[in-house]
Amino acid sequence: MEFTRKDLVDIASLSPEEITAILDTAGAMKEVLQRDRKKVPTLQGKTVVNLFFEPSTRTRVSFELAAKRLSADMINISASTSSVTKNETLLDTVHNLEAMQADYVVVRHPLSGAAALLSKNCRASVINAGDGAHEHPSQALLDAFTIRERLGAIKGLKVLIVGDITHSRVARSNFFLLQKLGAKVLFSGPGTLIPDSFRELGAEVYENLDDALAEADVVMMLRVQFERMQGAFFPSQREYARRFGLNMARLQQLKKDAIVMHPGPVNRGLELAPEIADGPRSVILDQVSNGIATRMAIFYLLSNEEAAA
Amino acid sequence: MSEKVLLDADAIDRTLTRIAHEILEKKPGEDGLALVGIRTGGAQLAERLQAKIEIIEGRAIPCGALDITLYRDDLALKKGRPVLHRTEIDFDLDGKDVILVDDVLYTGRTVRAALDALMALGRPKRIQLAVLVDRGHRELPIRADYVGRNQPTAENERVKLVDADDASKSALLLLPGGEGH
């Protein structure tokens, strides 16, 4: 299929065919990353700006490497060093970047909707690298790529997402993507951290993690995002680890070829026992490697038609 | 103007046999020979050439498939992005005599991209070009070493290879417009 979008703001508006096109393209990009010389001239002369209003090393570096593997020029701007500290608005910042001929803007912002606002108001291709508790589409795509790579397909799988669903844009994006590609999504976590809206959209919710483990083909552990929690959502870290942490005893309940995922960074001993994070079921480092190939695919497929015209 | 068959299945098969002989005549007894076909038509023709060389010589030479999309010079001019395929070359290109294979030689831009893509993968000793048809209209100083057929064409015509992988069905067509080179 022909992919003709300018921006990647969310998974919710993508068609299954568009998602599959991104995953297939990521497969071809992965071949490039396995070469001795891991660089192609595809985006030579294009400029990518990483505009990060929240700290993130993993995602920022992944986008940066992806852009560089495609030969684009890359600029990093973080909120603490930008004119935002001088009260410049988000749109002003981006219009200034556009005036400097940026072709792609990768934006991470604490407010939901920031990426959508930019996509409607600038010429450059906008890629959402996480906006508030809304979406993190590139993470869901790299997760799907990793699942497909390990288990062959996504249709028909049961994917159990565990933890802080309320604050997780990763969970939202994964939920939309996996449903679109025919997987069943199960959620487990403290009742205070699972919004009812997911039940209404067809997710199965398990208050008791042990009831769901044996069914899952994929267990996706979410990071407990203390930085986003204003109130007390569960009594203590110790209780959270006991009820919703993946430990060795729980690992025994999984199907023998089920895989364990985590978007990182892992709170070791809280969501995941260290020996599981480093064990054979874990695909956490595959997720990191596949992130570069997936983001290369995103850069490749988005086209800035106005700029090209 | 309606569709015209430039080469039918038998003619394509004979042409590939002749090209296989020509390649071997220029490289007698050398071990460093390899075939690399440009996806998609060229890759299928390269496999057929590999089979013919194996019959003639009694030995298999390595054969790979090259996707040149990431090296194209017209991506920015296009509205949608062409579908990427994988490059599959599972042998070392260093020091090899590589025969690059494509179905149609037209502007030369595909071959230019293929040369860049090959050089990024290794350092062949020499690269030669084999094409099923040369239809003219070059935009770059590129010529083929082995040509199945020279076919002068008008710019608004299209040349298309169908069923390149099937010796009994493949055909090279001249079309009034639309899909093709």
Image: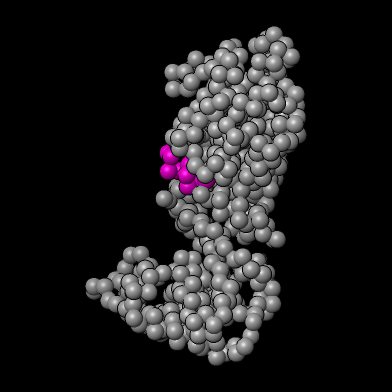
Task: Confirm whether the magenta stretch covers residue A16.
Answer: yes
Task: Confirm whether the magenta stretch covers residue A255.
Answer: no
* In the image: residue B17, left or right of residue A141: left
A306 or B147: which is nearer to us?
A: B147
A200 or B49: which is nearer to us?
A: B49
* In the image: residue A196, left or right of residue B61: left
A254 or A231: which is nearer to us?
A: A254
Residue B170 location (% of width, % of height): 35, 72
- Can residue A70 be seen from the camera position used here? yes
B80 or A82: which is nearer to us?
A: B80
Question: Which quadrant would residue B61 be assigned to in this image?
Answer: bottom right
The total number of labels drawn is: 0
Residue at point 48% right, 20% down? A204
Residue at point 75% right, 29% down? A274
Q: How is the image coloured?
A: one colour
Residue A208 location (% of width, % of height): 58, 15
| Principal secondary structure, stretch drawn in magenta | helix
> Residue A208, relative to residue A23: is it above or below?
above
- Can residue B110 be seen from the camera position used here? no
Residue at point 56% right, 54% down? A28
> Residue B76, relative to residue A176: is it above or below?
below
Residue B67 location (% of width, % of height): 53, 63
> Residue B121, relative to residue A308: is it above or below?
below
Question: Which quadrant would residue A139 be assigned to in this image?
Answer: top right
Residue A246 location (% of width, % of height): 67, 24
Residue range highlighted in magenta: A14-23
Residue at point 61% right, 56% down? A31
